[in-house]
Amino acid sequence: MITAGFRWLADADMASVPVEMRAECLRGLERVRSVQTAAHASVLSAFDHDGGYTDDGQGTSRTWLMWQTRVTLGAASGSVGWMRRLRAHPAVGAALREARVSGSWAQEICNLTDKLPESARDDADTILLAAAGEGAELADLASLADQMRRRLAEPDRDPGPGFEDRRLRLQTTLDGTGKLDGDLTSQCAAMLQAVLDTLGKKMGPEDDRSKAQRHHDAVAEACRRLLASGCLPDRAGQPAKLELQITLEELIRRITAAGRQDSGPGNAAAGRGGIWQGGPGIAGQLWPRLTDDTAPVPDPAPGWPLAAPGEECDASIVPLVTGYLDHDLLASLTAALASQSRVCDPGLCGKPLIHLDPDSLREVIITHATALLSGPRGLASILRTGTLDGAAASVSLPLDTGTSTETIPPHLRRAVIHRDRHCAAPGCTEPPAGCQVHHIRPRSQGGITKLTNLILLCSFHHLILVHEWDWTITLNADGTTTMTSPDGKRVYHSHSPPNAA
């Protein structure tokens, strides 16, 4: 009957109902929500007390709720939290059953009285509920609870650590996104508010982020600046170091793709010689799946790309390449060594026989030696895990770990800072400490790391405006800059055009 009533209300045409009736309906629904919270907590409490979750093979009521009612971990934790909360606050539970207080206010009252001695908690709940019923606001209830806490405080014989007033928890999901919640001290809240006010303000007319989105980016920017400051323990260099992971197969796929796309003189990929050229090249014969456009693209290595678009433009990067034993490649090389003139069997690769001179054959073997010897299933791993015991016999993933390398040389960074002095986006005066060096023409499109192709941009104009929203910022010959939206309808100039002579 309850479900049918709510279904009828959800299907009703509320647009034809007078506003006064809609308001009364919303007030009534909030009262119903309070009763529903108390009822759910009561049923769950009895279910949990008798261990009903064990009948379905679950270890806790939280996991039972997740799997049997199909709710998220956060929702299940919230239900268990209400169960425990109302066990400790029977007066609040009674107020919810009688719809004298909303669920959100009830939770705030419980949080306030949890800081008091357990012997005084019931009386404090009753006093705060009565004050709320008489029209007191949450700030008034907090002030009243603080007075209770000071009066009930006993002589501080053993102060203890004194950290009960602070808590912060960061939960991450499988895809790396996070949820942050906690209780901050007044000093910490004031400092965080100052960060949000300064770094979370609108950056210009082109900034159409919401307040919540600006505050998120402000926290990210504060962390980015702290990491780049060199003030954290065991962090050397500036800016922050990024670790980028990629499989050897994907690395060679990109190299062969570059060989197909860029074959002009002076191109780095083409300059490597025939071994790296796609299609008819040796890499295409040994790994046909790397040059076959119709073949499915393999899944990237876990964590690739670790950095968001644009974050690698001005950072110290440590590449990490992983690999595995390729049995098809091993068969091809074995056949080549046996014949001294052939590198690939027609039945294996589906390609004509390739005749190689000794120098070319030597180059092939050296080039692909790491693919045979390294990786979690490589020859080196098999020898080590087969001869050693304990932790030394565990699987080894890294194939190659590069040293930290700055994408923008220090001398060029200093020159860009000296020239631009602050963020070069029109209207932005963010100082160099909060800026990064950006390639005007991306390196993926042939952009060169030179002074005339570099510009100083703050994190918003660099990571969000350019790399997320696809705006363009150009450096004019006279040193001014022009910023253009993707549709070309909004154009901003750092300086007004010169007056006509």
Image (cartoon, rainbow, N blue to C red):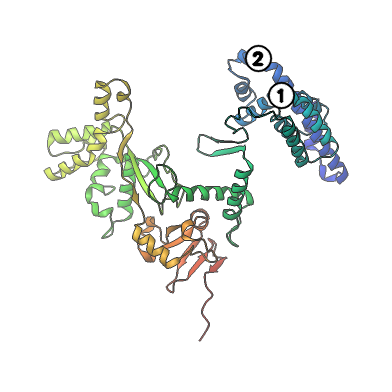
Q: Position of residue 127 (x, y in %)?
A: 81, 31
Residue under the image location 28 percent in, 55 percent down: 268
Q: Position of residue 144 (x, y in %)?
A: 77, 37
Q: Residue 228 bears which disc, if any? A: none
In the displayed structure, 76 sits above or below 202; it is above
The residue under label 2 is which amino acid type?
Answer: Gly
Is 55 displayed left or right of 244 in the figure? right
Q: Quadrant of residue 110?
A: top right
Crowd band around label 2 with a 10 angstrom C-alpha radius: few (<14), some (14–19), many (20+): some
Question: Closer to the camera, 230 or 355?
Answer: 230
Q: Which tag, 1 or 2, sits closer to the chain's start? A: 2
Q: Residue 118 bears which disc, if any? A: 1
Question: Closer to the camera, 121 or 450?
Answer: 121
Q: Position of residue 389 (x, y in %)?
A: 29, 20
Is 473 displayed left or right of 357 in the figure? right
In the displayed structure, 65 sits above or below 447; it is above
Crowd band around label 1 with a 10 angstrom C-alpha radius: few (<14), some (14–19), many (20+): few
Question: Closer to the camera, 18 or 204?
Answer: 204
Q: Residue 52 bears which disc, if any? A: 2
Question: Closer to the camera, 19 or 340?
Answer: 19
Q: Residue furthest bottom?
A: 501
Circle 2 sits in a helix, a strand or a loop, which is it?
Answer: helix
Circle 1 sits in a helix, a strand or a loop, which is it?
Answer: helix
Q: Quadrant of residue 487?
A: bottom right
Foreground disc of the pair 1, 2: 1
Spatial CA distance of label 1 from label 2 is 29 Å
The answer to whether residue 357 of the structure is visible from this angle is no
Q: How many marks?
A: 2
Residue under the image location 24 percent in, 54 percent down: 271
